[in-house]
Amino acid sequence: MFGPGALGARVFDPGGLGRFLTSLGTVALALLVAGWAAVAAEPDVKLGEFIPASPPQPAPEVSFTDLSGNWVAVADFKGKLLLLNLWATWCQPCLKEMPSLEKLQAAHPDNLAVAAVSEDRGGKGVVEPFIAKLGLDKLKIYLDPKSAVGHAVSVRGLPTTLVFDAEGRLVGRVEGAAEWDSEKMAAALKPFLSEAEGEAKLKRAER
């Protein structure tokens, strides 16, 4: 068994701890990749495609924050089609799809809200300087360092985008990176965008 000296070396050796944490991160990433591989192997699931919810589900009662620390909930986006995009700075597929998300947001400024919610545990300190380098100014960035949203809706990997209609109901999701400005995705989102546009026109008429 371990003697006191050996145990002390294992507990207090900073280099050993660093190697352990690095190894743990590698294992976690490997599990995430394996998880997406398992999802892709399912016969009815294609990564990057819209998966409708049947029937639509109530929005999860969770909150996240903007970069200024203000709390936000799904209900705050009611009246617009909401794409709640869960991503992380270390996730290459997440970064690949962000330009197309920005193009989609720019094309529908009145009836669509894209909320890019970072699942990075480091929070603002990790995310803010990273976002500055991307040069994407149309996307609104939010923080969820405890992965409250991901746990609430049983996310299986990143990126995952949750789609909420103008009434705030979860109407579908996209697992894996998607081409958000493609004709196929436009066709999938068109009914929800039209509904949100109707809501926007009604509000303008009431003013």
Image (cartoon, rainbow, N blue to C red):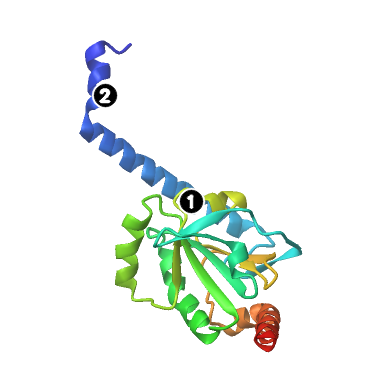
**Looking at the picture, does residue 73 appear above or below residue 194?**
above
Quarter of the image where the N terminus is located: top left
* Mark 2, other Cα within 10 Å: few <14 / some 14–19 / many ≥20: few
User: Which residue is outermost to the front?
Assistant: 207
Q: Position of residue 58 (x, y in %)?
A: 71, 59
Secondary structure under the numbered disc 2 in the rendered image:
helix
The image quarter in which residue 13 lies: top left
**Looking at the picture, does residue 206 appear above or below residue 174?**
below
Q: Position of residue 9 (x, y in %)?
A: 22, 22
Residue 90 has which mark? none
Q: Nearer the viewer, residue 138 or 65?
A: 65
Residue 10 has which mark? 2
- Res. 46 in view: no
Q: Residue at x 67, y 71 (%)?
A: 165
Secondary structure under the numbered disc 1 in the rendered image:
helix
Q: Residue at x 31, y 36 (%)?
A: 20
Circle 1: residue type: Leu
Q: Position of residue 163 (x, y in %)?
A: 62, 68
Q: Residue at x 60, y 81 (%)?
A: 111
Q: Which residue is mark 1?
A: 32
